[in-house]
């Protein structure tokens, strides 16, 4: 899992858009962060 995250972070934005899977993972991670922030706030 950490390996995948590091890989997606190194990829440029436009390259991530070319890979739906990478973009989906990014969206999932963002929603997770938002959920955590809402729970804390």
Image (tube, helix red, strand yellow):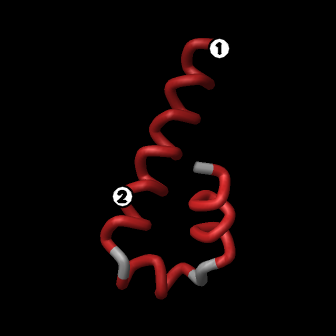
Q: Is residue 27 above or below residue 16?
A: above
Instruction: State the residue at coordinates (50%, 34%).
Output: 32
Instruction: State the residue at coordinates (48%, 56%).
Output: 26
Foreground of the two, 30 or 4? 4
Q: Is residue 32 above or below residue 9?
A: above
Q: Is residue 29 above or below residue 5?
A: above
- Check disc 1 and report its element: helix, strand or loop: loop
Instruction: State the residue at coordinates (55%, 19%).
Output: 38
Foreground of the two, 32 or 22? 22
- Check disc 2 and report its element: helix, strand or loop: helix
Image mark for residue 31: none
Instruction: State the residue at coordinates (39%, 79%).
Output: 17
User: In the image, is 20 to the left or to the right of 4?
Assistant: left
Give the crowd class for mark 1: few <14, some 14-19, many >=20 residues within 10 Å.
few
Q: Which corner quadrant of the image does residue 21 belong to? A: bottom left
Image mark for residue 41: 1
- List x then y, in percent, for residue 1: 58, 49
């Amino acid at each position: 899992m950490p390996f995948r995250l590091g890989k997606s972070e190194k990829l440029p934005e436009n390259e991530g858009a070319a890979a739906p899977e990478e973009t989906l993972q990014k969206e999932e991670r963002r929603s997770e962060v938002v959920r955590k922030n809402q729970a804390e706030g």
